[in-house]
Image: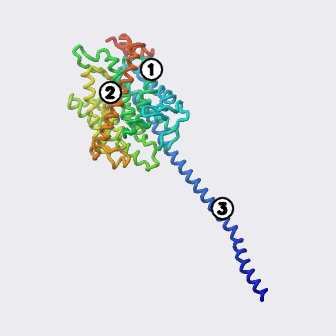
Amino acid sequence: MRNVALRHAWRGVLWPVLGAAALVPVMMAGVAKGQDVATAAGQASDAMKSLLSGVDTIWVLVGAFLVFFMQAGFGMVEAGFIRAKNSCNILTKNFMDYCAASIMFFVIGYALMFGGGNGFVGLSGFGLSGASVPGGVNVPLWAFWLFQAAFCGAAATIVAGAMAERMKFQAYLVYTVIISGLVYPIIGHWIWGGGWLANLGFADFAGSTVVHSTGGWAALIGAILLGPRLGKFGPNGNAKAIAGHNIPMASLGVFILWFGWFGFNPGSTLGVTSDGGALAARVAVNTNMAAAAGAIAAMVTVWLRFGKPDLSMTMNGALAGLVAVTAPCAYIEVWAAVAIGLIGGVIVVFGVRLLDRLGVDDPVGAVPVHGMNGLWGTLAVGLFASPAVGGDAGPVGLFYGGGLHQLGVQALGGLAGAAFSLTVMGLVFLVLKRTMGLRVSEEEELKGLDIGEHGLEAYSGFQIFTTE
């Protein structure tokens, strides 16, 4: 009986042990399989993150390429709006603007704009050594840098048109180095680099202040210190029209700029994967509608005021709408984009007239388009910004119950940027005027800067200069 009992006892112990032992390989295989699944899931997640980052990178790079192409638009507009004898000169300045911006923004500009420092200026990342992208940006440093460098070039080239047909080329080279390396990056740091205006809640989505006002107000002080072209104003102070030599070229330039603005504004989303591109699409529509409204408003205004639907003013109206909507484009409804563009078109017409009455010669309308409408677009954020578009973290305009706070911050930022650009560039132009000289000789201006400064003609074989 005892042996039987022992056998039953061993069986009661042995069979569970053997069963558990048999399950060990199965369990180990399951664990290994679970680890493989987890590893595969992690790899899939990493691959998806890499894919999304790649899509955002391509988006930003395409935006950078479009903004770079805007240099061609600026060149065509400016060359078309001035006389043929100065075309090579203005185009050379456009080339040098982007070249200087590329070098200066690489060496010091990015560091001053996005480097760690204080509320006024960045102090790290010179030559991109140890530099990084701002928080929340999902693209590599190189892509972000190229996009921002293209913006820097756009800001610099605005001045060329306002000072066209009479500024020394060597003085212009000094100007473009300083605005690219110092002025633009410092204002950019205040707003996009975590500076004091950013901390106050100032909103400038794609650069009505950072890019356009910076260039526009520098153009104003430069045109004042340089003086008007010979023959622009009569003895009684009345402005005389000096027709551009190629309006079709200028028209092509405006369309190139309009096209490039779809990189300028929608590209400033810096990605399309977080929301499926919904914000970029809205920004693109707002950009387009403001440009169209600006062109219509300028045409109607000049038609009613002077009796003819002037094409050059219509084109500047489109550019005015584009500049004005650049700051608020990510925060507004479509109807607001139309309203902003309409007002911008009116501003550019009366802005040109105001400069004429003040005796300021701006051959292409750079100051009304970029300076005045850059300020208008900046203020428009404080009026039209909708919480339904910008979300909880976005600005809220006066018309949506936001009160005067945002409008006040926008006014402060717009005026601060204007004051800094006017002051620093004013000092630069004064120093240049007292040293190497700012303006070419009267003889050279009459013959044309193409011959005097560059020794060639834009249209070889044609007699293009006059002695009047």
> Which residue is denoted by mark 2 in the rendering?
367
Q: Is residue 245 visible?
A: no
> Which residue is denoted by mark 3 in the rendering?
32
Q: In the drawing, does residue 223 fall left or right of residue 20?
A: left
Residue 192 x %, y %: 42, 37
- Residue closest to the eye, 371 or 96: 371
Instruction: Assign a secondary structure to mark 2.
Output: helix
Between the residue at mark 2 and the residue at mark 3, the CA separation in whole angstroms equals 69 Å
Q: Which color scheme does this rendered protein use? A: rainbow
Residue 80 x %, y %: 36, 25
Q: Is residue 21 above or below residue 281?
A: below
Q: Which of the 4 quarters of the picture holds residue 253?
A: top left
Instruction: Assign a secondary structure to mark 3.
Output: helix
Q: Which of the 4 quarters of the picture holds residue 16?
A: bottom right
Q: Is residue 55 above or below residue 90?
A: below
Mark before the other along the chain sequence, 1 or 3: 3
Q: Write the residue at 34% across / 22% down.
A: 221
Q: Write the residue at 51% across / 32% down.
A: 124
Tag 1: amino acid = Val
